[in-house]
Amino acid sequence: MAKINNHLRLGVNIDHVATIRNARGSNYPDPVRAAKIAADFGADGITAHLREDRRHITDTDILRLCDEINIPLNLEMAATDEMLEIALHHKPHAACIVPEKREERTTEGGLDVIGQIKDLEPFVKSLSDAGIRVSLFIEPDPAALDAAKSLGAPVVELHTGAYCDANAGHERDVELERIVRAAMHASDIGLECHAGHGLTFDTVQPVARIANIAELNIGHFLVGEAIFVGLGNSISEMRRLMVEARVVEARAGK
């Protein structure tokens, strides 16, 4: 069984700082500066997705992040030879393998781990052999978790998009229960469990209260909120809500 830790880590995704930069083809706002601010305001790690089409994060951003930040970098990547070569060259702390389609606006769901076991196996092995912590971005489904375990990935990240998009009330409660059950199953089979995608101030606390989840990765909402309150304040408030939720859950469990 995976260890349950009362400290819930926050990984801040800086992709959409780069999206704003690239909209004008300028060199600002700088995603590396955003990563440093995130570190100063309580982020435990930085997540950056280097896409095939380089729509936001670029190769230079990854190089600079590896050289200039002092907290762990989680490289989100598709299972392609190009991305594997980049990951093995830079050796970030972690690599999260995600599905990727050129036509999508953002990641639309979890990996088809069950159907792609043979394709994913060499990527998981190569990254692990290089000392990179591998995670697989998957749906909150026990069968997908079992497949991730069989691949030898030590970490899974549960896709929270359906939960965040669901209508408040019964529909959202059903999606939350899927995440709860998946996190418990991950713990039972010895996987470290993370979660992310679409989380906001309004949706984060029920997920943060799930004791089996060790880390949340949040980005788009934090960058959007930063327009109004500043990035540091946005991250600080998310951290506050996460800590509050964990404290409440810990007290309830006594």
Image: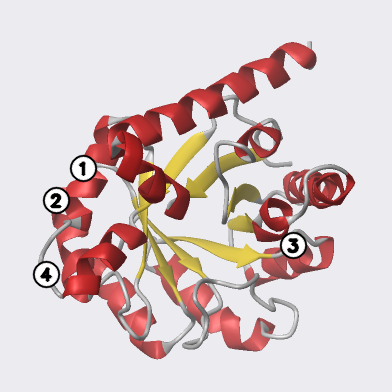
Marker disc for residue 68: 2
User: Mark 1 and mark 2: span between their CA atoms?
Assistant: 8 Å
Q: Residue 198 has which mark?
A: none
**Amino acid of disc 4:** Ser
Residue depth check, mark 3 versus mark 2: number of the one nearer the observer:
2
Is residue 99 shown above or below 66?
below
Disc 3 is placed on an element classified as helix
Asked if residue 3 is positioned above or below residue 218 in the image, the reply reads above
Residue at left offset 71%, top offset 64%: 139
Q: Cα distance, mark 3 to mark 4?
A: 41 Å
- Classify mark 1: residues with Cα within 10 Å, few (<14), some (14-19) or many (20+): some
Mark 4 element type: loop
What is the CA distance from the residue labelled 3 to the residue labelled 2? 34 Å
**Closer-to-camera residue (164/49):** 164
Q: Residue at x 49, y 36 (%)?
A: 9
Can you identify the residue that label 4 sits on? 26
Find numbered disc 2 in the image and state the secondary structure of the residue it sits on: helix
Residue that protrudes farthest toward the front in the picture: 228
- Mark 3 highlights which residue? 145
Q: Is residue 23 above or below residue 204?
A: below
Q: How far apart are the two marked residues, 3 and 1, measured between alpha carbons?
A: 33 Å
Q: Pointer 1 and pointer 2: residues touching (CB < 8 Å)? A: yes
Q: Amino acid at mark 1?
A: Lys
Question: How far is the residue under mark 2 from the one under mark 4?
Answer: 20 Å
